[in-house]
Amino acid sequence: MYNNITILGAGSWGMAIAKVLQSNSAKVSMWEYNKEDCEIIRSQRCHPKKLSMIRLDTSIEITHDLFNSLENAELVVLAVPSQFLRKVLEQLQGIDFSKTSFVNLAKGIEIGSLKRMSEVIHDVLQVPLGQIATLSGPSHAEEVALDMPTAVVAASESDTLTQNIQQSFSTQTLRVYQSDDLVGVELGGSLKNIIAIGAGISAGLKMGDNTMGALLTRGLAEVTRLGIAMGAKTDTFAGLSGVGDLITTCMSRHSRNRYVGEHIGLGEKLNDIISSMSMVAEGVQTTRSGYELAKKYKVEMPITFEVYEVLFNNKPPDAALSDLMRRGLKAEIW
């Protein structure tokens, strides 16, 4: 188990994981980039707009100093939204991380480069992929923080790293599985957010359970198709980071991505929805990346394409749903 752990990012997931790691007797330091938010968390041991239902133990150090937060860190937990991860990591270039492991919590694909988060970490810090893992699965921070039973999966090219993460993160209410399919786990966790926006749109349009069941099933099919084209294992998408995370994110009241979609379905504008949120809905920008990946790998992803059209080309949600239903008839294939 890791004794000294640094968490970069003090959003709801960062704080929930800090609570988990501290409960396993690790010395935890957490960095918050916003100085005002840092002071709020440090003084109140929570943040009323991010995760108000818990109080962080006083042993958890909360700091605005990025470099001090990393002192003696054996494991760095990256709880930074995917589109900001590169910018944070670039500040750390030149530091010797030869004996440091990294675990990514973000669920997204970088715009432009179309890189997964492990690839971004490797690209910026030049650490071997064997020192990088991703933790993913159906795991809303609000429920993890309240010790509701949760299962997730740690994926890496290194079995030793996933075993160490498994030992450090597992508690009586958080169960961690291992996977060697880093590509599949990262893609499943990221791309399901696109489908969750579609699920929210369906809910906003007052569609029923039949519609939702079809959307989740066919959404999983297109996520799996892209994953296989990119080198992932088929079975991964039937696991926690695939169908498990998909169902949870599409159905939950905690889901930021479903929230965005639902309000779009109700007729609100994307910019207005995003500006009203205190936390990031990763699926909005991942829709751009997923759309580009589908074109790059020549994979049919009709739900992703329609969500893209609604978000970025102002296509009416009901027209997008109609176009999905009027596509050419075919056999059910994955």
Image (cartoon, rainbow, N blue to C red):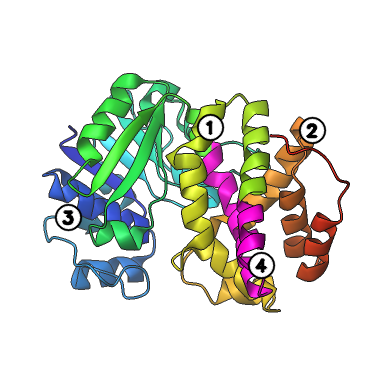
Name the front one of labels 4 and 1.
Answer: 4
Pointer 3 or 2: first along the chain: 3
Marking on residue 184: 1
Secondary-structure class at tag 4: helix
Q: Residue at x 21, y 55 (%)?
A: 19
Report, in whole angstroms, how far the alpha carbon at label 1 lies from the one at label 3: 33 Å
Q: Is residue 334 visible?
A: yes
Rendered image quadrant of residue 31: bottom left
Secondary-structure class at tag 2: loop
The amino acid beneath tag 4 is: Ile
Q: For residue 194: magenta?
A: yes
Rendered image quadrant of residue 209: bottom right
Location of the N terminus (image quadrant):
top left
Pointer 2 or 1: first along the chain: 1
Q: For residue 263: magenta?
A: no
Q: Describe residue 108's horizontal placement relative to residue 127 as left or right.
A: right
> 278 or 197, which lies in front?
197
Pointer 1 or 3: first along the chain: 3
> 37 or 53, which lies in front?
53
Name the front one of labels 2 and 4.
Answer: 4
Q: Describe residue 92's horizontal placement relative to residue 307 as left or right.
A: left
Q: Which residue is mark 4?
A: 201
Pointer 2 or 4: first along the chain: 4
Q: Which residue is mark 3?
A: 60
Pointer 4 or 1: first along the chain: 1
Q: Residue at x 27, y 33 (%)?
A: 165
Q: Which residue is mark 2?
A: 298
Give the residues drawn in magenta, as a range: 187-216
Crowd class of label 1 (few under 14; some 14 to 19; many from 20; radius 10 Å): many
Q: Are marks 2 and 1 in contact (CB under 8 Å)?
A: no
Pointer 4 or 3: first along the chain: 3
